[in-house]
Amino acid sequence: SGEAIKKILKEDIHEDQKWLAEELGVAFSTLNTIVRKGNPTMGKLLWILDKLGYEVVLRPKKGTNIAGRSIIIDSVRED
């Protein structure tokens, strides 16, 4: 997911991690650690992707009505 964030920033948003850190209100070092490790929690991933204008979609690999069976995850309950 760290690579996906980098790709979105570079190819779609045309900004860098410094810009994203400012948008999120976190230190660059904090965001850089999340992206570099490449394994953020689902909550952090959704938070970052929301700021970038993206969402997570779960889609079946096979079967009929794939679009109808897809699920959009737009929030995570943190216990």
Image (tube, rainbow, N blue to C red):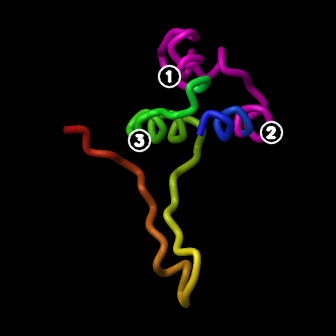
Give the image location of residue 48, x and y in percent.
51, 34
* Quarter of the N terminus within the rendering: top right
Magenta segment range?
8-34
Query: Which residue, given by chain and number where applicable, does mark 2 sit on?
Result: 11
The three-letter code of the residue at mark 3 reads: Met
Residue 24: percent from the left, percent from the top?
50, 22
In terms of secondary structure, what is the magenta stretch mainly?
Answer: helix
Q: Is residue 2 left or right of residue 41?
A: right
Query: What's the distance in space between the residues labelled 3 and 1, CA to CA?
Result: 16 Å
Label 2 SS: helix
Q: Which mark is residue 65?
A: none
Residue 34: percent from the left, percent from the top?
52, 24
For residue 24, the mark is 1
Residue 9's place in the image compared with 58, above or below, is above
Q: Secondary structure at mark 3?
A: helix
Disc 3: which residue: 42
Q: What's the residue type where badge 2 is placed? A: Glu
Is mark 1 in CB contact (under 8 Å) with mark 2? no
Which is nearer the N-term, disc 2 or disc 3?
A: 2
Q: Nearer the viewer, mark 3 or mark 1?
A: 3
Check if residue 25 falls in the magenta segment.
yes
